[in-house]
Image (cartoon, grey):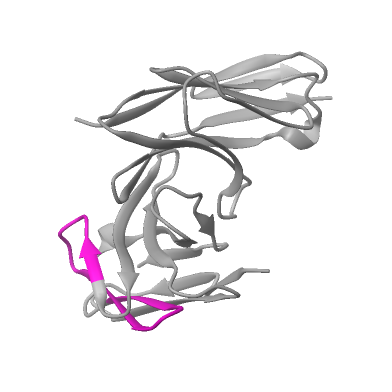
């Protein structure tokens, strides 16, 4: 069966520090991969999605970036965090874009 | 503009009191309508996929239905463990557009 791992679960970072969140999927090949941010009481905002190694589409211009160095690995990064980057970050995978997405347990990011 | 709107924002029910959650969508080229359950501090958990108007899916106390403009999640005789936020999402091309969710609380 397929599983998705996302870490860390919580992270507290100072403003201006770098960020690296990692997500890996097991049990499937060539998945679509997604990074979302969820603000309190709001829906999920798609940040990046990838349909293959090295292929990244950005939905929201900001100081975040994503990379997919391996088929089942998706990384969310920032060189300098802003206060507005605080939130709940979720990684997800799907077989195709019209198929259900399956989510990790998320990372709660707090910027001080 | 593609939009997915859920109502109500919050719903409080007594155990056993059936109700429905609404998800209305205005999108071009709907490729699927999805329902998820999200518990606090967790990622959304997939419940149902609906692909065409008139389609229905059931799982325990939940039933999802789809029309050309909206989807309903019917909850029959809910229990306290059904308390969660329920999200709907519309698949459009390579995008999945999520609603803001309905926070359901079921009191014993």
Q: Position of residue A64 (x, y in %)?
A: 24, 69
Q: In the image, what residue occupies the spot 51% across and 62% down? A: A106
> Quick check: can you spot residue B7?
no
Residue A19 relative to residue B107: left or right: left
Which secondary structure class fits the magenta region best? strand
Q: In the image, what residue occupies the spot 41% across and 34% down? A: B99
Q: In the image, what residue occupies the spot 55% across and 24% down? A: B10
Give the vertical position of B96 relative to A55 (above or below): above
Q: Position of residue A71 (x, y in %)?
A: 41, 81
Q: Position of residue A53 (x, y in %)?
A: 32, 79
Location of the C terminus of chain A by quadrant is bottom left
Span of residues in magenta: A56-77
Q: Position of residue B16 (x, y in %)?
A: 82, 17
Q: In the image, what residue occupies the spot 38% across and 53% down? A: A97
Give the vertical position of A76 relative to B46 (above or below): below
Q: Viewer-proximal residue, A108 or A102?
A: A102
Residue B105 relative to residue A74: left or right: right
> Quick check: can you spot residue A40?
yes
Give the vertical position of A75 relative to A105 (above or below): below
């Amino acid at each position: 069966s397929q599983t998705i791992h996302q870490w860390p679960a919580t992270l507290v970072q100072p403003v201006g520090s770098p960020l690296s969140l990692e997500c890996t999927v097991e049990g499937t090949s060539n998945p679509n991969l997604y990074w979302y941010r969820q603000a309190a009481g709001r829906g999920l905002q798609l940040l990046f999605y990838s349909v293959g190694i090295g292929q990244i589409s950005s939905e929201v211009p900001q100081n975040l970036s994503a990379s997919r160095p391996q088929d089942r690995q998706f990384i969310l990064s920032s060189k300098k965090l802003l206060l507005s980057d605080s939130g709940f970050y979720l990684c997800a995978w799907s077989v195709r874009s019209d198929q259900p997405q399956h989510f990790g347990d998320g990372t709660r990011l707090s910027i001080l | 503009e593609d939009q997915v709107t859920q109502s109500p924002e919050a719903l409080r029910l007594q155990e056993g009191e059936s109700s429905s959650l609404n998800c209305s969508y205005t999108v071009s080229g709907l490729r699927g309508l999805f329902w998820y359950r999200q518990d606090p501090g967790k990622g959304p958990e997939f419940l149902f996929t609906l692909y065409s108007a008139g389609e229905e899916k059931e799982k325990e106390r939940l039933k999802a239905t789809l029309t050309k403009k909206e989807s309903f999640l019917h909850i029959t005789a809910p229990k306290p463990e059904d308390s969660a936020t329920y999200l709907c999402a519309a698949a459009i091309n390579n995008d999945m557009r999520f609603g803001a969710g309905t926070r359901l609380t079921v009191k014993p």
